Amino acid sequence: MSSAESPTPDAERIEVSRFVPAPPPEVFAVLRDPQGHVDIDASGMLMDAEGEPVSAVGDRFLVHMDREALGDFPMGQYDVEVVITAFEPDREIAWTIEGTVKPPLRHVYGYRLEEVEGGTRVTSYYDWSDLREDYRAFLSFPIVPESALKGTLGILDRTVRRRRTRSA
């Protein structure tokens, strides 16, 4: 799905893409860093993170959340664990969330990176197709709208540029 397309009403996945003028390793460095997740979040829910950069499927880190940013569900502040479900250096990273909702929802967020001339085509995706059936009746998806995925890609572009400038 291109960044100009919207999901169909019964779609259970959103994908948006953006060109970032940096090589995949620079982009991936932000995406594997727990603080990088907070730095690029356009939803406003991620407040802080704890943990080391991830390096494999199964790695975890803690994220301090504030659901009030969305104004949709009165959860307030809470913590979740990000659990890495896909990890291919400089190509793809994905995760699910474990936290206050038990058992977990089983929705997945991720990024695919493709090296292109002059930089990286970054595709952000959000997939709730494996959502537990018993949650479908009272939860509205997508939790994070397409506009937030697009915004996050813009912030990712800015963050990669700033990190490059600081390290130079």
Image (cartoon, rainbow, N blue to C red):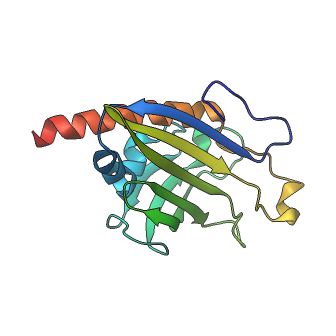
Q: Is 82 left, or right, of 29 in this rendering?
A: right
- Quadrant of the rendered structure where residue 55 is? bottom left
Residue 10 image point, x, y percent: 86, 42
**Is 1 left, or right, of 92 in this rendering?**
right
User: Residue 8 placed where, x, y %?
Assistant: 81, 35
Q: Looking at the image, is 64 positioned above or below residue 119?
A: below
In the displayed orientation, state which residue is furthest to the front.
117
Looking at the picture, tell me which residue is in the foreground, 115 or 36: 115
Residue ID at (33%, 64%): 53
Residue farthest to the top, as pictured? 4
**In-front residue for pair 132/66:** 132
For image coordinates 69% across by 27% down, the residue present is 5
Quadrant in the picture for the C terminus: top left
Q: How many marks?
A: 0
Tell me where residue 12 appears, x and y as whole percent: 77, 48
The residue lying furthest to the right in this view is 137
Image vertical order of residue 157 relative to residue 126, above or below = above
Left or right relative to 156: residue 112: right
Quadrant where the N terminus lies?
top right
- Residue 94 vertical placement versus 156 (above, below): below
Residue drawn at point x = 87 percent, y = 65 percent: 134
Q: Give coordinates of residue 95: x percent, y percent.
A: 55, 61
Residue, x 53% and y 59% (percent of image)? 94
Which residue is situated farthest in the left direction here? 168
